[in-house]
Image: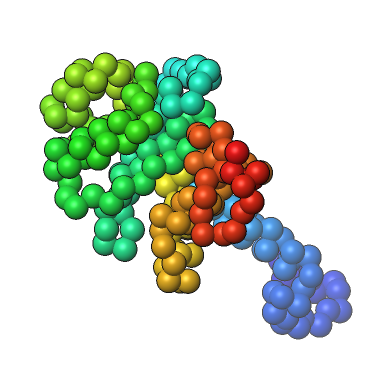
Amino acid sequence: MRIRLQAYDLDIEYKLGKEIFIADALSRESQGDKEIGLSEQENFTKSRMTTMFQNNNTKETLIIRDIPTRAWKQVYIDIFEFQACTYLLLTDASTRYTEVRLLKDLTGKTEVDNIMSIFAVNGIPDIVYTDQGLHFVNKDFKKFATDWYFSLITNSPTYSQSNGLVERHVQTIKCLFKKVAQNRGNIYLALLDTAIEPGLPSPSQLLNSRRLRGLAPMSESAKT
């Protein structure tokens, strides 16, 4: 190699690789390929691990529920907590009329007694929808359904969205309770006049087909 170079008058000067554009580009390209390869391998490994340990989303048959032909035919029931208090909530599938009761305890007898008092005023529905909480799958509640002749249907434990109507109303009632607490108002007066869904009268008006008297002044013609 040196003999061949003797035929030329050359000055050899050392330069850093980053100052030689072609060499620098080649070195970066090679390094980039390695980085890309590692990145793809890491992503593939993470994807495999995620797939191995993630929960399986079981597909369930879509059940189309009949549209109720009258008020209080289908009722959804749920229990929720707000500011360390436990409430029972019933929602009519047709009118969206909502009953809320404060529960002094979570015994089956207390829950059934409160629901009985609501049914005594509004009538016994044909179907009652609940989740599979212990409040609704105990022997007292099943006996109540048998004695009062209504069908009890519980939603799937792996698909709680099927009870979405009452879950949405629970969130609406909680927001209403928060506003009442901030203004130091009365919860039951708020339920009397407040619409649960936009564009509709209050649930009480829908169920009774008339405006109910509250604290706000109203004419006699408006009450009919």
Q: Look at 20% across and 37% down and name the residue there.
A: 113
Q: Is residue 33 above or below residue 148?
A: below
Instruction: Determine the image quadrant of residue 13.
Output: bottom right
Q: Position of residue 187 (x, y in %)?
A: 41, 58
Instruction: Determine the image quadrant of residue 177.
Output: bottom left
Front position in the image: 60 or 106: 106
Front position in the image: 19 or 200: 200
Q: Position of residue 22 (x, y in %)?
A: 78, 65
Instruction: Determine the image quadrant of residue 189.
Output: bottom left
User: Left or right: where does residue 112 sit relative to residue 170?
Assistant: left
Q: Position of residue 133 (x, y in %)?
A: 24, 37
Q: Look at 72% across and 82% down and name the residue there.
A: 14
> How is this picture coloured?
rainbow
Q: Look at 14% across and 43% down and name the residue there.
A: 107
Q: Look at 19% across and 19% down and name the residue there.
A: 147
Q: Quadrant of the N terminus?
A: bottom right
Is residue 182 visible in the rendered image? The answer is: yes
